[in-house]
Image: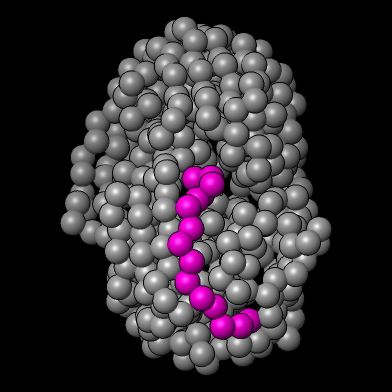
Amino acid sequence: MTAKLLAYHQPRLEGIVTVPGDKSISHRAVMFGAIAKGKTTVTGFLHGEDCLSTIDCFRKLGVDIFVDGTNVEINSPGMDGWQEPKEVLYTGNSGTTTRLMLGILAGTNFHSVMTGDASIGKRPMDRVTKPLRQMGALISGREGGKYTPLAIQGTSLKAIDYTMPVASAQVKSAILLAGLKAEGTTIVREKEISRDHTERMLKQFGANIEVKDGVISIEGGQELYGTHIDVPGDISSAAFFLVAGAIVQNSEVVLKNVGINPTRAGIIEVMEQMGANLTINQEKTEAAEPTATITVRTSYLKGTTIEGEIIPRLIDEIPIIALLATQAEGTTIIRDAEELKVKETDRIAAVVTELEKLGADITATDDGMIINGPTSLKGAKLNTYGDHRIGMMAAIASLITDSPVEIDDADCIAVSYPTFFEHLDSLIK
Ligand code: S3P
């Protein structure tokens, strides 16, 4: 844990950033490449701590994974050729690794134990263990399987028809991955659409998966086959510079390789609604995951209401959207976002506490927050709570404060954006 003093003295921002690989998609490329028989190659992989945790888990299952920067090669005998791990599978800070691995390990023929860091130890895993147990999974763990460490005895599974109680791509993906191994057709029904990278990528690995009107069906007993995955840049990482470009005076920032899958791109819609000056040039429109180059310029912003179906499409961007709202004229209301309480930290409490220290007019509610703007912000010592996205929000806030900001932990940012400060420094003018 390294503290960092951020003394940028109200700069202007100008330049080009090529956004690093998408975290959600990088995890899945490794996981599905390990499930698949043969060779999978990945380009644009996010070399961040969370995705490296996923690689580490599969190496312990005997999968051969070679990493060279953002290129990854996976050679797997297929799931049936994996070995029982001799060590505990350590998932670090990564909820995606922990939850998706549960769905995968449930259908093996061996025993495994998974645990993560202190933050993972507080995050609810029963949202995954419950539906998996309905499929026949044998999972035990702390508080009846609610928290890590979790022990999984692989067994044969049966399909379920499951209506999602919360919008969660991690839960959905765990069930679909268990469904790949289960007897019968597994159906997942979503009331609100969450990120659909699993559905898109399973097709790339040759799986037969049907998606229609929020209903996803996957037949059990299918094999995946090695393929090539080109990971787009992470819109959740781009989000920090999208907001920075809009709120820092006299700025123009070009973000290249931004993944704009509609199930992830809620922040673009919200920024446009708030009046942000964005130019979007679509690039790979035909790819499994579309991308764009986005230019953002300093903007006059107005408050808005963010609620309902858009929430799962921007859930990880809410901390930085809250900062954006402190610079917008009028009131911004964020509702229906209680899921923020079970992220890497309670992000409603963390965002409100830390932005208040900077002088923002912000109030926590049960399911979100209310922000009045615009307010000028002052320097302060901020807590990241070990949460990468709170750390990056604090760093972007420091660009507009009247005096320096100190964050208690700059290292946590490496979970999703190890080159964040390098990219930020390259934009400072
Ligand atoms: C993710 C899904 C989301 C998101 C997380 C990554 C994924 O979590 O917040 O950062 O890769 O599937 P939930 O499934 O809990 O909503």
Residue 213 appears left or right of 325: left
Residue 321 is a magenta residue: no
- Depth check: give the residue in front, 39 or 96: 96
- Depth check: give the residue in front, 130 or 317: 130
* Dominant secondary structure (helix, strand or loop) of the stretch shown in magenta: loop
Residue 155 is a magenta residue: yes
Quarter of the rendering containing residue 297: top left
Quarter of the picture holding the C terminus: top left
Q: Is residue 105 above or below residue 119?
A: below
Magenta residues, start to end: 154-169
- Depth check: give the residue in front, 277 or 308: 308
User: Image point 41% across, 87% down: which residue?
Assistant: 37
Q: Do we see residue 142 in this rendering?
A: yes
Residue 425 appears left or right of 191: right
* Label total for image: 0
Give the farthest residue toward the left: 286
Q: Is residue 346 above or below residue 188?
A: above
